[in-house]
């Protein structure tokens, strides 16, 4: 029986696949594509009410690897705030 609604498992699988795609693009040196996919994953996680800090760390690392240190620092701080909120406020 097919449902018209998307379940939690499907959302997690989709977001996980997007995450794997952005890691692959980054590993291939296709950094601009990876950046777009990371940002899309962050938006998707936010819409699905999922913690985004893991994806934020990956985007920060991409920025660091590109020498975009100010952008990386901003994203690492955002991820840190997300981890703190999740672990201390129970996300």
Image (spheres, rainbow, N blue to C red):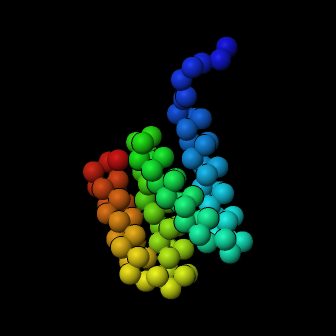
Q: Is residue 25 above or below residue 43?
A: below
Quarter of the rendering containing residue 53: bottom left
Can residue 80 be seen here? The reply is: no
**At which x and y percent is residue 80?**
36, 67
Tally the numbered discs: 0
Quarter the N terminus occupies: top right
Q: Residue lying furthest left in this view?
A: 89
Left or right position of 60 against 33: left
Q: Is residue 27 left or right of residue 84?
A: right
Find the residue positioned furthest to the top: 1
Instruction: Please state the horizontal and vertical placement of residue 70, each as a whole percent of the image.
Output: 38, 81
Picture quarter containing residue 31? Answer: bottom right
Q: In the image, what residue occupies the spot 45% across and 63% down?
A: 56
Q: Residue at x 50, y 68 (%)?
A: 59
Which is nearer the eye, 20 or 84? 20
Residue 11 seen by the camera? yes
Q: Is residue 65 left or right of residue 68?
A: right
Residue 84 in the image, given as x and y percentages of width and height: 32, 61
Query: 39 or 87: nearer the eye?
Result: 39
Up the image or down, 4 lies above or below 86; here it is above
Question: Where 14 falls versus 84 (above or below)?
Answer: above
Instruction: Reply above or below: 16 against 35.
Output: above
List x then y, in percent, for residue 77. 34, 71
Out of 86 and 64, give the one closest to the viewer. Answer: 64
Residue under the image location 43 percent in, 76 percent down = 72
Q: Residue at x 61, y 43 (%)?
A: 14
């Amino acid at each position: 029986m097919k449902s018209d609604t998307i379940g939690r498992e499907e959302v997690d699988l989709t977001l996980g696949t997007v995450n794997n795609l952005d890691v692959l693009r980054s590993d291939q040196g296709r950094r601009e594509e990876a950046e777009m996919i990371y940002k899309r994953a962050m938006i998707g996680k936010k819409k699905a009410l999922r913690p985004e800090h893991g994806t934020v760390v990956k985007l920060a690392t991409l920025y660091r690897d590109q020498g975009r240190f100010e952008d990386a620092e901003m994203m690492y701080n955002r991820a840190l705030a997300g981890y703190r909120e999740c672990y201390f406020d129970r996300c």
